[in-house]
Amino acid sequence: MALGLADGLLFLVVLGCLAAVIVGMLGPVQGGMKLDTAFTWHPILMSFMVLGRWAYVTDSLGDKAKQRPVHRALMVLAALFAIGGYVAIFLAHRKIPSFFGYNFKTHKRLAG
């Protein structure tokens, strides 16, 4: 199935955004990080997470009956990427005693 012009442009924009995030996180730029750092994976995985919606709004796949299995597969992958992104941010912050405003050492909230 050929992509329509709008779908093709959207696909190129999405690939460009993903490439920008990956280069920004892993490239030899100021603020770039290594692959073995847990936080590096958070923005990368969360960027992939948003791609599942495309399959349900595109006209290139035909009718809804053909779109649903593709949408389902992409949304399952998106959910896995989102969970991976949250796990990465949790792992990146696990050594900090205060995590999201809660101090796990003293068991007290820091605000409120």
Image (cartoon, grey):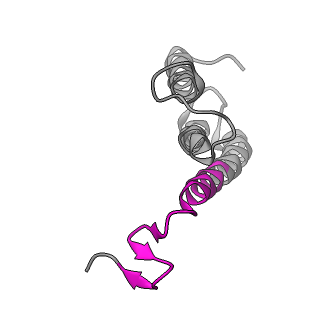
Magenta residues, start to end: 81-109
Q: Quadrant of the C terminus?
A: bottom left
* Residue at the image point whose x is 33% and y is 76% from the top: 110
Is 26 positioned to the left or the right of 10 in the image? right
Q: Residue furthest left?
A: 112
From this view, report whether residue 98 is shown above or below residue 32.
Answer: below
Q: Nearer the viewer, residue 15 or 29?
A: 29
Hey, which residue is sitting farthest bottom in the picture? 107
Q: Is residue 71 left or right of residue 57?
A: right
Q: Nearer the viewer, residue 7 or 28?
A: 28
Q: How many labels were placed on the picture?
A: 0
State the image coordinates of residue 109 (x, y, percent, origin top left).
Answer: 36, 80
Q: Position of residue 16 (x, y in %)?
A: 52, 19
Q: Nearer the viewer, residue 5 or 73?
A: 73
Vertical comparison of 49 with 106: above or below: above
Q: Which quarter of the picture shows residue 103?
A: bottom left
Say which of 101 and 6 sits in front.
101
Task: Tell me residue 102's x, y (percent).
Answer: 42, 75
Q: Which of the 4 quarters of the picture holds residue 108?
A: bottom left
The residue depicted at 54 percent of the width and 38 percent of the height is 47
Instruction: Tell whether position 12 is magenta.
Output: no
Identified at 38% across, 71% down, the residue is 101
Quadrant for the N terminus in the image: top right
- Looking at the picture, does residue 55 appear above or below residue 96? above
Q: Picture coordinates of residue 27 (x, y %)?
A: 57, 21
Residue 95 is covered by the magenta coloring:
yes
* Left or right of 66 in this view: 15: left
